[in-house]
Every structure is written in C-alpha cells, then in structure tokens.
Amino acid sequence: MPRRCTVCDHPDRNGIDEALVGGVPYRSIAKRSGLSESAVYRHKTEHLPTHLLKAKEAEVVAQADDLLNQVRNLQAHALDILERAEKAGDLRTALAAISQARGNLELLGKLAGELDERPVTNVLISPQWLELRTVIVGALEPHPGAREAVLRALEGGG
Ligand SMILES: [Zn+2]
C-alpha cells in the first residue's frame, strides 16, 4: 500500500498547489499549513506536475466539448432553416442551408476525430515534442526539399 501524502490529503490542497505554482517556498508553505517540509517538497516534485497536467487536460476537454456543442447547435439551426426553406419552396435558401449543414458535418467529424485521438494530440503539443520539432526543422533549414518533406510528414499526422 502506497504511503499517503499529507499534502494530497490536506483540506487546503488546492491552496497549497496554487502557492507552489506561484513560487512560494515550500518551507513557508509547510510552516503555514502545519505540514512537514519533506512532505511538501515530495508533493511538489512528485504530485504537483500530475495535478497540473490533469487540470490542463480537463480544461482542454471542456473547451472541445463546448465547441462540439456549439457546432451541434449550428447544425440544428441549419437543418431547421433547410426544412422551412423547403416547405416555402425557397430553393436558394435551402441550398445555402445544405451547404452550411455540410460544413457543420465536416467540422463535427473533425472534432469527433480529434476527441478520439486525444492522447495522440497531447503528445504532439507537449513542450518536449515542440522543442524537438523545432530542432529538426531548424537543422533541415539548409535542405529545403528535405525540410518540406519532413514538415509534410509531421503535419500529415502519420
Ligand atoms: Zn501529494
């Protein structure tokens, strides 16, 4: 059974995490919260990065879900307009609504795909990857042909 972390169990864990992120020395946090310095230090190095990552991921997912909802809303409107335009025999408006609905479907498909590929997407936006990518692309600067091929391969997403 893993040892419990007194900071993770602390009622003011969020406050402690915020203080750590804000650069407050772990010694003063320990004193203030009645925790041992070693516990705060261990929490900072072992647990805080995971907490932050999870919070960030939750935020990204929430944003994507929100976007998805908005596109679904747009699609409902487009289909509504299409139905009314067809009933009114307004073919020009019906055609515009169809075109709009098709665009929404493409967007929905793309969003759904991105949501499914979330772990892959996360790897591709990790700072380490971006740094490596910059190094690769920079190293290929004198070889425009190779550089372009690599960029195409990278952006193609495999
Ligand atoms: Zn902890």
Image (spheres, rainbow, N blue to C red):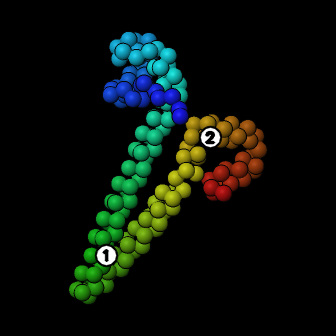
- Give how far across and how far down residue 59 sits, in percent: 40, 44
Marks 2 and 1 sit apart, C-alpha to C-alpha, by 41 Å
- Give how far across and how far down residue 135 sits, in percent: 68, 36
**Amino acid on which disc 2 is placed:** Trp
Mark 1 surroundings: few (<14), some (14-19) or many (≥20) residues within 10 A: some
Q: Which residue is tagged 2? A: 129
Residue located at (47% from left, 29% from top):
4
The answer to whether residue 135 is left or right of residue 122 is right
Q: In what quadrant of the picture does the C terminus appear? A: bottom right
For the residue pair 140 and 63, the one nearer the viewer reads as 63
For the residue pair 135 and 23, the one nearer the viewer reads as 23
Q: Which residue is tagged 1? A: 79
For the residue pair 99 and 120, the one nearer the viewer reads as 120
For the residue pair 131 and 17, the one nearer the viewer reads as 17
**Amino acid on which disc 1 is placed:** Leu
Give the SS element for disc 1: helix
- Give how far across and how far down residue 20 sits, in percent: 43, 22
The answer to whether residue 62 is left or right of residue 49 is left
Residue located at (31% from left, 75% from top):
79
Name the mark nearer the viewer: 2 or 1.
2
Residue located at (65% from left, 41% from top):
133
